[in-house]
Amino acid sequence: MNDYPEIKARFERETAGHQMTVLHDDGLYRHLRFANPKTGLYWYEIATTPGQLTFSGDGDSFVFRLAPDMFEMFRRSAESGGINAQYWAEKVRTGNAHSYSRERFEEYVWKQVANAESHYRALRDDVQEEIFESVTFDVNYESAALMAVLGYEYHLSTGPDAKGNWGPFRFRRVHEWELRDFDWWFLFACYAISDAIVKYDAAHEAVAA
């Protein structure tokens, strides 16, 4: 399980002053709002109807669909009190749970460079300059990152590569690179939903006591 500690810490920091407002609460029909009354930043709302939960707020919205009681689905599938991003992403019907990850792109690039640099003089420095410090390609964006590696060639070979080739270095199998990872706002939403259910349950328990 990955708890995504950076996103968890950010969620806790950005929502430290949030207050819960119950706008509607009738069985499986719920509408909760969480916001900091002093700033309004990072507010979000969670609404449920039978078989559906909608998260909306200070960013993209997500609609999850599965069980009649979606709060119970999230309670049951949460991992050790945390979130279950992989499983919950499978239940998203509206919204993008994944987005381009520059970190993943860098992993693919440097792995291939590491495997080949003994056969190409100063390859690592050239990749750094021509791809990551390029004024033409901004690798913070997927399309630009792919264009950068697909058009890259390096000719200063010091000997045949691992396959006995003397040709230029090129990045291989780029079309197979998996460059998408969980979007940070989706993970934020997962933590928000988990926290909202805890606070909602605590409020009900307090009333029942």
Image (tube, helix red, strand yellow):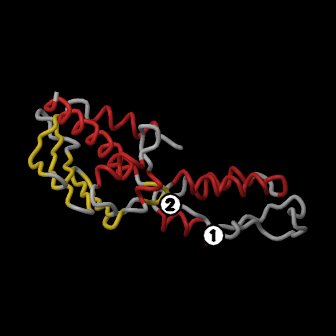
How busy is the neighbourhood of tag 2: few (under 14 within 10 Å), some, or many (20 plus)? some
The quarter of the displayed image where residue 171 is located = bottom right
At horizontal 45% and vertical 56% (from top left) the residue drawn is 87
Q: Amino acid at mark 1?
A: Glu
Residue type for callout 2: Arg
- Pick the residue in front: 181 or 138: 181
What residue would you read off at disc 1? 176
Q: Residue furthest front?
A: 209
Of residues 96 and 2, the one nearer the viewer is 2
Q: Residue 159 got which mark?
A: none
From the viewer's side, name the closer residue of 98 and 114.
98
In the figure, residue 113 lies in which quadrant?
Answer: bottom right
Which quadrant is home to the C terminus?
top left
Q: Are marks 1 and 2 in contact (CB under 8 Å)?
A: no
Q: Secondary structure at mark 2?
A: strand
Element assignment for label 1: helix
Q: CA distance from mark 1 to mark 2?
A: 12 Å
Q: Tell me, yes or no, if residue 40 can be seen here.
A: yes
The one nearer the camera, 129 or 181, is 181
**Position of residue 204 measured from the top left corner of the image (x, y, whole percent):** 18, 36
Does residue 61 appear anywhere in the picture?
no
Residue 190 rendering spot, x and y as whole percentages: 35, 48
Reply above or below: 178 against 20: below
- Name the residue rendered at 79%, 54% in the picture: 117
Q: Which residue is found at the position 36% from the left and 36% from the top?
A: 10
The percent position of residue 7, horizontal first and vertical second, equals 40, 40
Using the image, tell me which numbered label, if any, was put on residue 180.
Answer: 2
